């Protein structure tokens, strides 16, 4: 387990202040776990053989353990690089999931409006309003499009931040 690099604190604070503290927790978890070690070609071959053997309902030798490697700690400058990449990857993934969800919901609402048997409340202009656990959350297509467009700027900003932190230059 690696010690958290103090240079990550501004990123973690920015995530928490923007309401993405869940992502800060994921960063901590990822750094705590470290980078998984990949199995060698020989170990993969042995694992395939073990699966085939198991499929034939034969007993595997007890001493054959696969994938029992300790993770490689992420330390120093690598933590900074890893964290910046992780944040942009996760936010991009969340935006893609939101886009897919919105498209599916719009499709459901559209099909419901076309049906004579289903009563669908009027859609808010330019987007859907979704109530989750009593809290009203709404997203409009234009907001999503702005978020998608902002991903490249976020990627560039995090890349610049990562580089400046690792080289010790001004991050502004």
Image: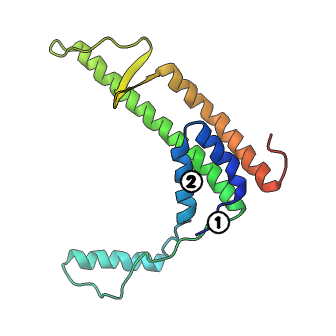
Q: For this rendering, which residue is in front, 133 or 63?
A: 133
Where in the figure is residue 75, as x and y percent of width and height?
Answer: 67, 65
Among the 4 quarters of the image, the one containing residue 17: top right
Q: Are marks 1 and 2 in contact (CB under 8 Å)?
A: no
What residue is rendered at 48% in x and 76% in y?
A: 41
Where in the figure is residue 152, as x and y percent of width and height?
Answer: 64, 35
**Residue extending furthest right?**
169
Q: Is residue 152 above or below residue 136?
A: below
What residue is rendered at 71% in x and 39% in y?
A: 157
**Residue extending furthest left?**
117
Check residue 56 in the rendering and tell me which mark sits there, or answer none.
none
Indicate left or right for 78 with 137 as reference: right
Q: Is residue 6 above or below residue 105?
A: below
Could you say whether the residue bearing mark 1 is in a helix, strand or loop? loop
As measured in the structure, the alpha-carbon distance from the residue carrying label 1 to the one carrying label 2 is 13 Å
Check residue 27 in the rendering and tell me which mark sits there, or answer none.
2
Indicate left or right for 36 with 53 as reference: right
Among the 4 quarters of the image, the one containing residue 155: top right
What residue is rendered at 63% in x and 48% in y?
A: 12
Q: For this rendering, which residue is in front, 117 or 26?
A: 26
Q: Quadrant of the N terminus?
A: bottom right
Where in the figure is residue 10, as x and y percent of width and height?
Answer: 70, 47
N-terminal label among 1 and 2: 1
**Residue extending furthest front?**
134
Q: Is residue 101 above or below residue 136?
A: below
What residue is rendered at 83% in x and 53% in y?
A: 168
> Which of the two marks, 1 or 2, is nearer to us in this view?
1
- The residue that label 1 is drawn on is 3
Where in the figure is residue 49, as x and y percent of width and height?
Answer: 33, 79
């Amino acid at each position: 387990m690696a010690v958290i690099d103090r240079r990550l604190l501004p990123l973690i604070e920015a995530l928490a202040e923007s309401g993405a503290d869940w992502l800060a927790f994921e960063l901590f978890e990822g750094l705590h776990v470290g980078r998984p070690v990949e199995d060698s070609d020989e170990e993969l071959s042995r694992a395939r053989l073990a699966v085939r053997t198991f499929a034939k309902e034969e007993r595997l030798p007890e001493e054959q353990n696969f994938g029992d490697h300790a993770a490689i700690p992420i330390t120093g400058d690598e933590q900074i690089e890893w964290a910046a990449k992780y944040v942009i990857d996760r936010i991009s993934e969340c935006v893609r999931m939101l886009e897919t969800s919105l498209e599916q919901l719009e499709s459901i609402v559209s099909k419901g409006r076309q049906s004579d048997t289903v009563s669908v409340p009027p859609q808010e202009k330019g987007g859907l309003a979704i109530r989750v656990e009593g809290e009203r959350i709404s997203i409009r297509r234009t907001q999503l499009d702005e978020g998608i467009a902002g991903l490249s700027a976020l990627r560039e900003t995090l890349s610049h931040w990562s580089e400046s932190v690792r080289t010790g230059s001004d991050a502004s």
